[in-house]
Image (cartoon, rainbow, N blue to C red):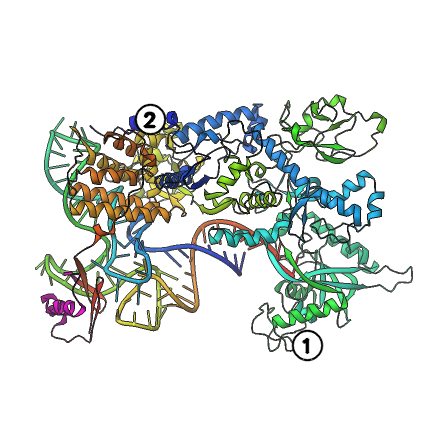
Amino acid sequence: MSYHFNEIEAKWQKYWADNQTFKAENNSAKPKYYVLDMFPYPSGAGLHVGHPLGYIASDIYARYKRHKGFNVLHPQGYDSFGLPAEQYAIQTGQHPAITTETNIKTYRRQLDQIGFSFDWSREVRTSNPEYYKWTQWIFIQLFESYYCTDSNMARPISELIAVFEAEGNTQINAACDDDVESFTAEDWTSYSSEEQQRILLKYRLTYLAETEVNWCPALGTVLANDEIVNGLSERGSHPVIRKKMTQWSMRISAYAERLLQGLDTIDWTDSLKESQRNWIGKSVGASVTFNVIPAVTSSAVETSHKIEVFTTRPDTIYGVSFMTLAPEHELVSKITTEAQKAEVEAYIQATAKRSERDRMADVKTISGAFTGAYAEHPFSKEPIPIWIGDYVLAGYGTGAVMSVPCGDQRDYDFAKHFNIPIPNIFEGVDISEEAFASKENVKIANSDFLNGLNYKKATKTAIYELEKLKQGEGKTNYRLRDAVFSRQRYWGEPFPVYYVNGMPQMIAQEHLPIVLPEVEKYLPTEEGEPPLGRATHWSWDTKNNKVVSNDLCHSEHSEESGSVTSSAVETSLDNGIYPLELNTMPGWAGSSWYFFRYMEDLADRDEAFATEDALNYWENVDLYIGGSEHATGHLLYSRFWVKFMKDRGFVNVEEPFKKLINQGMILGTSAFVYREEGTNRFLSKGLIEGKRVQPIHSDVSFVNASEELDIEAFKNWRVEFKDAEFILEDGVYKVGRDVEKMSKSKYNVVNPDAICEQYGADSLRLYEMFLGPLEQAKPWNTAGITGVHGFLKKLWKLYIDDNGLKVDDSEPTKDNLKTLHKTIKKVEDDIENFSFNTSVSTFMIAVNELTAQKCTSKAILEPLLALISPYAPHIAEELWNRLGNETSISTTPFPTFDASHLVESSKNYPISFNGKMRFTLELPLDMTKDEIEKAVMAHEKTIAQLEGRTPKKVIIVPGKIVNIVG
RNA sequence: GCUGAAGUGGUGGAAUUGGUAGACACGUUGGACUUAAAAUCCAAUGUCCAUUAGGACGUACGGGUUCAAGUCCCGUCUUCAGUACCA
């Protein structure tokens, strides 16, 4: 009986589904273990062999943990809101929900055929109202919270209101907008309700603000920084411009320090932590205030202006020879003198024209303009010229810098270009060629009270003196910006928000979810409103608490991106029906908390986003596997939301993912044929030398393991190749190969369906692991799969021959036991280290050895199945069953390693001369050093090697090596 | 530029604490079986020299430490990924 993998795999997949084999328990005496994959976006293209790599790895680990006696939660779901379904909807009119449903069916079929041990009873889909109800709920909680910097945690906004009522905001330490003005308790109570709401919005953890956003005209939406690559949209590579819009934002900046500190508590790779650290971008320094010297004019007295800058080098304050403001800085128009006005305005116009992309592409060109104004040095009181320049970014720090040309290369280049003096404040350093940016091994000079001090001391002293003058203080800056949370899209979570007189109001929890309305078309409106602007029923009835027709609503949606103008809505017309928010939430909303939803095992999950019992039991994800492309998006936003939820007592963990592994990308091995230029002749790979040929991608399925092209298949592939002439070498046409990203246009995409059909899911699983280390990028080449497929056939033959089962109760031999136990040890170590590729080799070695040993002993072959079961679960179940077991192998204890079977009595010593191994010698392990030396020195090959010389030294490491020197 | 990871046969890769480099596969070559093919099985396979015995070289490059270095140290180069006028 041979190995019929198709039948076997279908049989066990059905068995697992029918018996709910992998259903996790929320009450169990076993310890818990939570293994999670980054859930997929169900795209129309389906899975290619690169997608399941991480799923296979996590599945092996999940199955291993079950064998190790854990109660394993290994769920799966779909991140089902997203752009492709919407774009498809725009093109075809098909509702995104329908496309999504179809794609999910394909995904599910493809995932099922690979034999994953997912607990599908807990599936989530971010686009389901029963799910996004809770995404909306979390949004409301963020709105109802502020960040208290005294207790360093989020607190209910009601506490803040109570303080405002009691003492105003002067004593409050909270994360808020920059433009908050101070007020007293009396002021607060005298404010109108709208005014109070406007102020509170500056404190809330999600807030509405006029922000400069990355607007992508082609996609008709705002993009987050991590959705932009080189100034173009990540999806579709469209140009992105800066635009001011009223948008929901998330005050993630309040969590910058905790997001940074938390990295030390989690088991992630260094490169990933480093990405997040860079993204958060903490820099420690000082804030310094410079007074602008009022211009001497004949007319009215000038008001005094101050420029605040952030610097990481307050120690270099005596090196300041000019100041630079971003062209967009608000002070520019106020301080520019009459004489410089024309030049400054021309410069501002010129920079405004340049897109973000141009500015990024062209950092070499130095440009700027002098404002004519001067600031006063805080210590020397010397006048310092104030310039503007686009190398200073409006969005970072205060949008202004104190320029120290001797210590900063950008300041240096700017000073050189505009002939500004470059004073040297470093002792014994030559700055005639470039700035000296190092902090190490240098003393400050020409700096009054800082002279002779090193970086550390000078910094401390400078800050101390600035504080005395009330012109500065120590300060920490973060690069991390608040995250824009509005998207002008249809296929996303609607906000549970309506507007009264322009102020956003939350809909009470009991009325959620606010379900996405139907629209005729999925495009923005002619007025430039988001697609929800086309919904006819999209107003909130505050009396009956339901969504009603817009006809009943007297307020109007504004033209600006979904917010609502507070203009002239007369109270007499106010019938309690208001417009709903027109934006939807971004893709990362639903994915920032989905891991908690899986914890809930109740059929009716509508009590809460997850019940307290479930949250307490599962805590957080023990192992998370997914792509590194989410380093600064999903993985940062999730951490932010979890910290927030912890603060507000909704969950009890500070971090969502304890251990995280990034699987490497699987690349395609493209195949090329070579057409001679100007002909229809195709030359085999070996014949192209010196010829002018054009390489053309061939579909990889036409090429066999020996790089030979199936010419007929290629000719029939496309009409243009029908009459092609092929010049062969040695009777065959050989293709060229190159490793590229898997993509349709390169015809190198391999579909797992075809692999499962031809070799089986177990072969696919083993081969994906066998390719190389999990975290490494590696090329796929279907040809190699015959290796692991052959292994499975050999494994099968170890148990079954033409007469059926050949396993018996014979006593295992010493060799049998040795093979089994070294395999147990190696595989267990490998799984713990996520070194799955080496386990597959170990299995091959074990099966090769047991086959050679003609092992038929059940005492060996039964535990072997438990070892292989996480990797190749179908064949393991089948053979396990044929050995007479009636239940699934999935929870059988992992075999226990017994070192006594590996104890050797002798060692085949490598005998080296001057470090070069010359021969080996089998010697008993209980020999002493002297005895070993005697045996080795007496050996004829040793005598031959030495040619009569006397060795200077003999190194003997018992059990390891012998090295003879001399 | 900065940060992180890496560089080993024709290919994917292995080498766990410094101790026999190239495990395990793919491919290639030769052989068995077969009318033939497929499948299967056996043998060889880092490079070079040598009929054999054996020898020289060899883990990106140049140095160093050590009885012994793919592994540790110093310097250089290359590739990949992330990030970038961040004050």
> How many angstroms separate mark 1 from mark 2 (CA)?
82 Å
Closer to the camera in the image, A689 or A541: A541
Write the start and end of the magenta stretch as one range: A919-948
Q: Residue A381: percent from the left, percent from the top?
A: 78, 71
Q: Residue A834: percent from the left, percent from the top?
A: 38, 47
Residue A927 part of the magenta segment: yes
Q: Which residue is drawn at 62% across and 77% down?
A: A427
Report the amino acid beneath label 2. Answer: Ala
Q: Residue A262: percent from the left, percent from the top?
A: 54, 52
Picture quadrant where residue A321 is located:
bottom right
Q: Residue furthest front?
A: A29
In the picture, the quarter occupied by the N terminus of chain A is top left
Residue A449 part of the magenta segment: no
Q: Residue A135: percent from the left, percent from the top?
A: 60, 35
Determine whether A360 is above or below A486 in the image. Answer: below
Report whether residue A690 is seen: no
Report whether residue A535 is seen: yes
Disc 1 or 2, which lies upstream in sequence? 2
Q: Looking at the picture, do discs 1 and 2 lie on one chain?
A: yes
For the residue labelled by badge 1, is the local secondary structure a helix, a strand or a loop? loop
In the picture, the quarter occupied by the C terminus of chain A is bottom left
Report the amino acid beneath label 1. Answer: Asn
Q: Residue furthest right?
A: A299
Crowd around label 2: few <14 · some 14–19 · many ≥20 (10 Å): some
From the image, tell me which residue sits under label 1.
Answer: A446
Q: Is residue A616 left or right of residue A964?
A: right
Determine whether A442 is above or below A806 in the image. Answer: below
Q: Which residue is drawn at 62% across and 30% down?
A: A490
Crowd around label 1: few <14 · some 14–19 · many ≥20 (10 Å): some
| Subunit ID for the residue under disc 2 | A
From the image, tell me which residue sits under label 2.
Answer: A10
| Subunit ID for the residue under disc 1 | A
